[in-house]
Amino acid sequence: MDSDLKQINTLAEGLMAGERRALARAITLIESTRADHRRQSAELLRQIGDRGASGVDAALRIGLSGTPGVGKSTFIEAFGMYLVDQGLKVAVLAVDPSSALSGGSILGDKTRMERLARHPRAFIRPSPSRSELGGVARRTRETVRLVEAAGFDVVLVETVGVGQSETMVAEMTDIFTLLIAPAGGDELQGVKRGIMEIADLIVVNKADGELLPVARATQSDYAGALKLMRRREFDPEGFPKVLTASAIAGTGLEEVWAAVRELADWRRAEGWHDKRRGEQARLWLGRALEHAAVEMVTKDARVAAALPGLQSAVDAGELAPDAAVDKLLSVFRNGS
Ligand code: GDP
């Protein structure tokens, strides 16, 4: 254990000195499921404390989502390059729901952002692959803490437009941005109301060439739709905001950053930033507890032995699900 602790000390020091190799190793540790690695991860997180997460030079966490093809990777590359050119250190993380389903990857592929990936002030990490989305998201949230401790100023967390993953990313970031494509017609391109409700900024990408007038029309459609929604107490006047940008032409990026800053500064000054972080922490505590409790019960050998029979009884309609749970908990506590 002593040599373990020493290793974690060294890792934490390297990480806090901003060493990339230490950061990469720390993330690998965080993503590991091995019980000893989980203990080491907890110790590592304890050692970094809230470094980089609070105070005047605290990192800003930005969530970014959109359907496949909307231009997320192109936008992140362009926006990320804009930010590093301002002298900022930018980390890009991903929560890929497909990694939980199939072990595949529709996001977080490094080769998609080649220029940014090579930049010394940028760090790109693909999505962890786990068996369930909650696990992917929990690990990503811990990784956010690592990159902040390593001195990154902006953490972009990307996800694809699937309800559950978008909500989870919104719940680990300060500002949630939805990227949409220009589209004709007056209906709102199937963007679910729930997503509109969590968006702080909507960016109509591809506002270039022939698509420019369509992008402007889309912008005003969305602005109109947002006006009909209830004003949120944690927004200043004019937010949620709809902007246009072109990731390819590099236009509108400055405006997006200005809007992000305006919103972030206001929320910090008004106390909403800390309140939101606190609520998020509580929420993730609940999720982690739920996960740990389920794991503890279902890994118990006696429970595992009793489960198939109870499952069949529930399937056959002979036993109510709640009654089966009571029975399993009794097996867990008393062995029968
Ligand atoms: P993702 O699936 O959301 O990551 O989308 P990609 O970044 O891979 O982009 C999908 C397609 O849209 C690619 O062919 C891009 O070249 C194109 N694209 C992305 N951004 C823009 C833009 O600002 N303008 C135009 N015209 N095309 C874009």
Image (cartoon, helix red, strand yellow):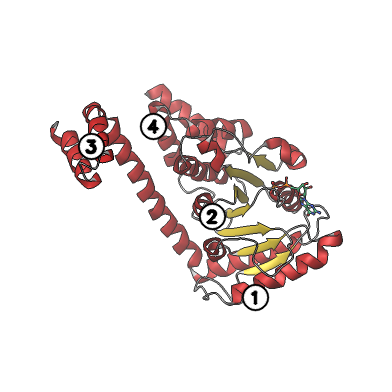
In front: mark 3 or mark 4? 3
Q: Which numbered tag is attached to residue 39?
A: 4
Q: Which of marks 2 and 3 is in front?
A: 3
If you read the primary sequence from the N terminus, does the residue marked by circle 1 or circle 3 appear first? Answer: 1
At label 1, counting other C-alpha atoms closer than 10 Å, the crowd grade (few under 14, some 14-19, many 20 or more) is few
Quick one: label 3 or label 4, which is nearer the N terminus? 4
What whole-number distance in Å separates the C-alpha atoms at marks 2 and 1?
26 Å
Nearest to viewer (mark 1 / mark 3): 3
Residue on which disc 2 sits: 173
Residue at disc 2, secondary structure: loop
For image coordinates 63% across by 58% down, the residue present is: 178
Residue 194 lies, with reference to residue 75, above or below; the image says: below
**Precedes in sequence: disc 4 or disc 2:** 4
Q: Is residue 221 left or right of residue 331?
A: right
Please determine whether, in this image, residue 10 is positioned above or below residue 75.
above
Residue type marked 1: Gly
The residue located at (63%, 40%) in the rendering is: 106
- Name the front one of labels 1 and 4: 1
Check disc 3 and report its element: helix, strand or loop. Answer: helix
Label 3 close to label 4 by CB (< 8 Å): no
Characterize the local packing of mark 4: few (<14), some (14-19) or many (20 or more) Cα atoms within 10 angstroms.
Answer: few
> CA–CA distance between discs 4 and 2?
25 Å
Residue at the disc numbered 3: 313
Residue position for label 1: 224
Q: Is mark 4 within 8 Å of ligand 1?
A: no
